[in-house]
Amino acid sequence: MRFLTLVYFCFIMLVPFARLRGAEAFALSSQAQVEPSTTVPVMEPAKLVLQWTANQKITLSSFTVPVTNELQFTERKFLPVAQNQDGTYSQEIELTFLPMALGDLEGPSLELPYQTESGKSGTFRTPPVKITVTGALQGMVSLDMLRDIKGPFAVGFLSWAWFALAAGLALTAAGIYLFRSKKKKQASDLDAALPRRPAGEVALEKLMELLKQYGQEGNLKYFYIALSVIVREYLEQRFQIDAMEKTTTEIFKAMRQAGLDRKTALQSRDILSQSDLVKFAKLTPTEKEALAVHDQARQFVLDTQELPSASGPANPDKENGI
């Protein structure tokens, strides 16, 4: 009887201790969201905000963000770990990205390694997020810009006089336009009769002039914009790709569909992507980086100006990383 009483007493004493140990079990959750909203304009910077919450303080290790053609991540920022009122800990990680393609995209699910204060290591995965990328002009029309139809108004003598004047000016403008169009066509026919300079020769000459002009002005943003235009013009003349009206991702796909090898397409994409980051993501490169991308563009022209004709269309969707 005393033995049973002793066992019961020990059981009563151990129950709170077991509950306490259970309360100390490690628990962690994570979430992800896009700021300022899940609908973002193309080529405009946005943020993918990751957040973890745990009942113990943890330290994140370095992690890798997948490289895609649709989303280009440019910067990451770790906010300080905060202790919440309920005793848990949380932290936010801001990943700045540049949407490069239109449509419904998916923000990647990331695997984040961590270590607790007690030395325990592990990983957890953040949930993917849906992102809708719109055109640059979409959503810019407001109701204030819409006006109702005006009613009929009387036409007097002065109105007819203004109408006649406007008609005369329109006829004069039409005559000037036809005259200039004829002169332009004559000049175009003359240019067509002359032998065309190789696209590579023209591009190398423009790159050299850009380097001289940059040495005089020192405007890095202008340098990157002009470099992008030169490379796009070269792609149009050399490979018959409408590069001036396409995004960097669309140019890459067009080159692959035209039968060009993956290495050549990746070289052009890398050069144009660096220019995109300066133009649209407002990154500030160094002079050393500017000269490096100039050398990269020059070498790209030298390597591709003598390439043989494309053998046939390729299917870029079957290759990884496209």
Image (tube, grey):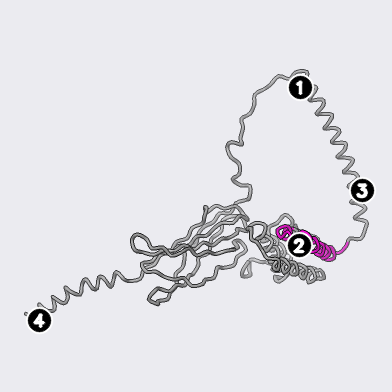
Q: Which residue is mark 2?
A: 231
Q: Which residue is mark 3?
A: 186
Q: Which residue is mark 4?
A: 3
Q: CA distance from mark 1 to mark 3?
A: 41 Å
SS for dot 1:
helix
Q: Position of residue 320 (x, y in %)?
A: 61, 70
Q: CA distance from mark 4 to mark 2?
A: 90 Å
Residue type pointed to by label 1: Ser
Numbered badge on residue 159: 1
Q: CA distance from mark 2 to mark 1?
A: 53 Å
Give neighbour class at mark 1: few <14, some 14-19, many 20+ (Cα, 10 Å): few
Taking the spot 29% from the left edge, 69% from the top edge, the residue there is: 23
Q: CA distance from mark 3 to mark 4?
A: 116 Å
Q: Nearer the viewer, mark 3 or mark 4?
A: 4
SS for dot 2:
helix
Q: Over which residues does the magenta segment extend?
A: 197-225
Tell me whether circle 4 and circle 1 mark residues in contact (CB < 8 Å): no
Q: CA distance from mark 4 to mark 1?
A: 117 Å
